[in-house]
Image: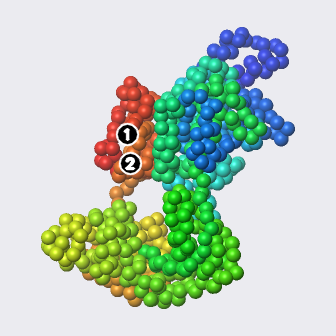
């Protein structure tokens, strides 16, 4: 088929050359018929689309710097920082507006000709942008050939983004290979789109979130409503439009915006505000563009709230991995309707760089629900130096100082520290670690108050109370006897969780789930290895395990050399803890190699969000596609499924829900 496409493309190029030289050799109708034939072949075999160069000749104009001129300006969006100003800015937009998350990515304009992706351009200066067609073509999660289109030439604008989970995966791989990490998802996308070698892009989940669509040639054929246009894009193969169609007269616009802000906080893709825009393209064309901003849209960004105050004292807290962090006690100050009396101090390096002291006059910022933090020291004329603790504030154990990539960290290495215990219990109770029922924050605090201060204490407590009834637990002072019975039973089940989860549960500084899995696999840890785990760690050689760099390696060896940690592992072994080896897991590759799936709707259950589910299924050998087509043989449906469900039903494609996911995953 590739040979046929190349031959037909060559034939059409010869027709073009003859036409533009003034000596046409075929009629226009014959040329159009040949071009449609080539287009059909490319749609059936998109893997050979790059050879059909005649379809990609878009004839784009360029500015003096060689950048590609936009068919329409791509101006910036003006920000509003209060709701009243944001609502006032809507007044010229007409009765109907769109309200959508403002994704934090790289703005791009993608041009399709006869349904085939032919050009991709950055926003640039708003008038012209840089060509990144090759880069976008290498991204497998961006539609290369559209399912259908109402016009021959279609331009889709949107945001190139990487999810937080994909960003974490890429950074984890870089860390394992000792390479520099990316600072944030947006910079990762930007850097990816500048790569000359595009082979790496196919392994990165760079997605395209559309926010506008028009035709440079036949825009009057498209509906006036932008919401309808965005819905059409979903049918063409793009991700479902995220925005809401709002009647500003009858709807509570403020509540809708607040809902989107809440959704932004929970989303796997970063959003830094809410965009409000006119729905009508007729109104948009009348409002047009200013020198810098589009006049038919704006962005609402709740302003960070700041204030000035004085540092009264420093309080030191101990976390689950023994990190001792400062908390600044300040003169109670009202910010955004609430009283702030405590501010994070992050770490001692950060405090030294800002020169924060007792009685420093400071400015601080409170953004949304995040912990307030210092932005500047204003006056130190009456300040006194901070005394950095030499012993743990909770258990008085001498502290050590670790230097982690230039940041000094204070550590308490006492495995029975009461300050570490409550946070440790809450952490290990989570389903991503040991998955222990009813080991929440309140239960953790109660256990610590009753001198249960490490994991060995916890599992010995479970062994000692296997037959204790809920009434007996109530008599012992537990606030819920029934919950404590469930806790005891769940602790028994947790004894055989996988080794990677158990290594994470031990709360070794700088060692988490990912590195714990590599350690468990490399050491081939077996169920009975808990009692000699410290010896196993001490036998690890430098550079033996990927991701275990010098700081983490030394910290792990120091942890294993401490007598209290050796005693902890010995007690856990005697309490019946026998973790499951990683090597005993069932092989996962290839199990679903015959499945080509599309996923639609919202998933909030056990298996995570759509990107997480997609990643898990791909690990099992399944192939994901962005749209429902004849090549797709499975549609996975969540809540509020869109048009893909109807289309799959028409094509006779098998439709499944979370019940199927439960069986497979």
Q: Position of residue 590 (x, y in %)?
A: 40, 48
Q: Secondary structure at mark 1?
A: loop
Residue 105 visible, this angle: no
Residue at (80% x, 34% y) in the render: 62
**Crowding near the residue tagged with mark 1, few <14, some 14–19, many ≥20 C-alpha atoms within 10 Å:** few
For the N terminus, the quadrant is top right
Q: Is residue 654 above or below residue 331?
A: above
Q: Which residue is mark 2?
A: 604
2 or 1: tag closer to the N-terminus: 2
Q: Position of residue 55 (x, y in %)?
A: 67, 26
Residue 647 left/right relative to 350: left
Q: CA distance from mark 2 to mark 1?
A: 9 Å
Q: Residue farthest to the right?
A: 64
Residue at (54% x, 38% y) in the render: 99
Q: Quadrant of residue 29?
A: top right
Q: Is residue 588 above or below residue 564?
A: above
Residue at (40% x, 51% y) in the render: 608
Residue 14 visible, this angle: yes
- Seen from the viewer's position, the closer of residues 617 and 382 is 382
Residue 587 left/right relative to 101: left
Q: Which residue is mark 1?
A: 639
Q: Secondary structure at mark 2?
A: loop
Q: Quadrant of residue 310?
A: bottom right
Q: Position of residue 419 (x, y in %)?
A: 41, 79
Q: How many marks?
A: 2
Q: Position of residue 266 (x, y in %)?
A: 47, 51
Is mark 2 in CB contact (under 8 Å) with mark 1? yes
Residue 85 left/right relative to 431: right
């Amino acid at each position: 088929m590739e040979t046929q496409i190349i031959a037909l493309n060559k034939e059409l190029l010869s027709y073009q050359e003859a036409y533009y030289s003034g000596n046409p050799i075929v009629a226009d109708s014959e040329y159009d018929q040949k071009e449609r034939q080539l287009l059909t072949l490319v749609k059936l075999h998109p893997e050979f689309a790059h050879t059909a160069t005649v379809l990609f000749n878009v004839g784009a104009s360029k500015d003096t710097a060689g950048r590609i001129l936009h068919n329409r300006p791509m101006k910036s969006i003006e920000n509003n920082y209060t709701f009243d100003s944001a609502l006032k800015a809507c007044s010229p937009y007409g009765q109907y507006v769109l309200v959508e998350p403002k994704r934090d990515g790289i703005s791009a304009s993608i041009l399709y000709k006869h349904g085939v992706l032919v050009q991709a351009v950055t926003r640039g200066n708003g008038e012209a942008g840089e060509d990144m067609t090759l880069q976008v073509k290498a991204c497998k999660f961006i539609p290369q050939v559209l399912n259908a289109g109402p016009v021959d030439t279609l331009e889709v604008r949107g945001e190139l983004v990487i999810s937080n989970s994909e960003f974490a995966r890429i950074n984890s791989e870089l860390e394992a290979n000792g390479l520099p990490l990316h600072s944030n998802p947006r910079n990762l996308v930007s850097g990816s789109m500048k790569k000359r070698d595009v082979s790496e892009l196919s392994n990165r989940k760079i997605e395209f979130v559309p926010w506008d669509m028009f035709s440079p040639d036949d825009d009057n054929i498209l509906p006036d409503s932008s919401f309808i246009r965005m819905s059409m894009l979903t049918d063409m193969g793009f991700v479902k439009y995220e925005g809401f169609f709002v009647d500003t007269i009858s709807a509570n616009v403020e509540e809708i915006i607040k809902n989107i802000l809440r959704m932004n906080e929970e989303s796997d893709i970063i959003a830094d505000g809410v965009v409000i825009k006119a729905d009508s393209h007729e109104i948009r064309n009348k409002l047009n563009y200013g020198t810098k901003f589009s006049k038919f849209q704006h962005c609402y960004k709740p302003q960070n709230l700041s204030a000035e105050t004085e540092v009264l004292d420093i309080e030191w807290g101990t976390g689950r991995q023994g990190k001792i962090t400062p908390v600044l006690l300040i003169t109670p100050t009202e910010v955004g309707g609430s009283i702030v009396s405590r501010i994070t101090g992050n770490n001692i390096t950060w405090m030294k760089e800002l020169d924060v002291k007792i009685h420093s006059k400071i400015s601080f910022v409170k953004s949304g629900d995040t912990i307030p933090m210092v932005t500047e020291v204003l006056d130190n004329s009456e300040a006194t130096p901070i005394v950095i603790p030499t012993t743990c504030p909770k258990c008085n154990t001498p502290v050590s100082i670790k230097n982690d990539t230039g940041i000094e960290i204070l550590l308490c290495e006492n495995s029975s520290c009461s300050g570490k215990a409550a946070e440790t219990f809450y952490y290990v109770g989570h389903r991503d670690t040991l998955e222990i029922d009813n080991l929440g924050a309140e239960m953790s605090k109660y256990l610590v108050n009753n001198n249960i201060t490490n994991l060995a204490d916890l599992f010995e407590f479970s062994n000692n109370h296997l037959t204790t009834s809920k009434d007996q637990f109530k008599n012992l002072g537990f606030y819920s006897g029934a919950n404590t019975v469930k806790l005891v039973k769940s602790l028994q089940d947790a004894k055989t969780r996988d080794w990677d989860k158990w290594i994470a549960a031990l709360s070794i500084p700088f060692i988490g789930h990912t590195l714990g899995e590599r350690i468990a696999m490399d050491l081939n840890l077996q169920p009975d290895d808990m009692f000699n785990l410290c010896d196993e760690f001490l036998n690890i050689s430098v550079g033996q395990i990927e991701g275990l760099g010098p700081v983490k390696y030394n910290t792990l060896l120091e942890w294993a050399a401490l007598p209290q940690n050796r005693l902890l592992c010995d007690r856990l072994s005697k309490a019946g803890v026998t973790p499951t080896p990683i090597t005993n897991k069932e092989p996962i590759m290839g199990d679903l190699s015959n499945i080509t799936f599309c996923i639609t709707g919202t998933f909030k259950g056990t298996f995570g969000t759509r990107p997480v589910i997609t990643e898990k299924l791909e690990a099992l050998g399944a192939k994901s596609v962005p749209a429902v087509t004849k090549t797709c043989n499975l549609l996975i449906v969540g809540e509020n499924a869109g048009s893909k469900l109807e289309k799959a039903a028409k094509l006779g494609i098998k439709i499944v829900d979370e019940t199927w996911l439960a069986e497979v995953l």
